[in-house]
Amino acid sequence: MNDNVTTKAAAAPAQDAPKKKLHPALKFVLELGPVIIFFVVNSKYDIFAATIVLMVSVVTTLGISWAITRHLPAMPLVTAALVLVFGTLTVILHDENFIKLKVTILYMLLGGALIGALYFGKLLLPIVFDMAIHMDDAGWRKLTWRWGLFFFLLAGLNEIFRRVLTTDQWMYFKTFGILPLTVVFAIAQTPLILRHEIPAESDDTDAHF
């Protein structure tokens, strides 16, 4: 009996060990890298070559993330899955509309999942942010509504621009339009986050998962 207790006690710290996290600079490179590569390859060749390189790059970034942290954040995983599905359709059917439509579907799924989960009393946004922010439930609900509606906005903008812009023009919007909009929106949420922020050890959102 004592041996069992000792064994369990020794195993407990390993189970409770915090997840390894990517260095912020590396995380930024891994997230932005495939987008920049996609843009550069398209400018030198075409969107079909760019799509193939994009598929390879997202798988590579996931592999690097897994090798370092031994877990995969939800949002990059969903993004990679959609890139692989719609990228394959783009290349096989030689139809660039699939890879453009991927952006719309990604943001519709994110917005729908975030707001839809609230109906069932679930908070998915902490998972999207890989638990990097710690707030009370009221703050998470407010932030979830804001991000959900923002994702719907991005989906709508992409639907408009993919229909009225040339492929090269759309590529500029995707690379230099969506990212700045997202950064500005994220910064604008700082006052809300600060009002509802709580210490990491007191985070009460774990009960929702």
Image (cartoon, grey):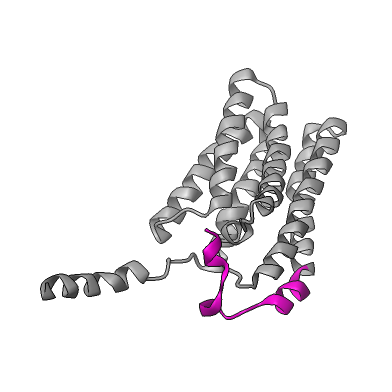
From where the camera sits, is residue 53 visible? Answer: no
Q: Looking at the image, which is closer to me, 69 or 164?
A: 69
Q: Residue at x 65, y 47 (%)?
A: 35
| Residue 120 x/y as whole percent | 64, 51
- The stretch in magenta equals 189-209
Residue 150 makes an appearance in the image: yes
Q: Residue at x 53, y 43 (%)?
A: 57
> How would you classify the magenta stretch by its main secondary structure?
helix
From the top left corner, tell me how far across and down residue 48 is, in percent. Answer: 64, 29
Q: Residue furthest top?
A: 93
Q: Is residue 199 magenta?
A: yes
- The quadrant where residue 44 appears: top right
What count of labels does the image hold? 0
| Above-or-below relation of 26 to 194 | above
Residue 70 spot, x, y in % from top left = 39, 57
Give the camera-side residue of 135 and 93.
135
Q: In this rendered view, identify the residue nearer to me: 60 or 46.
A: 60
The residue that appears at 75% across and 45% down in the rendered structure is 174
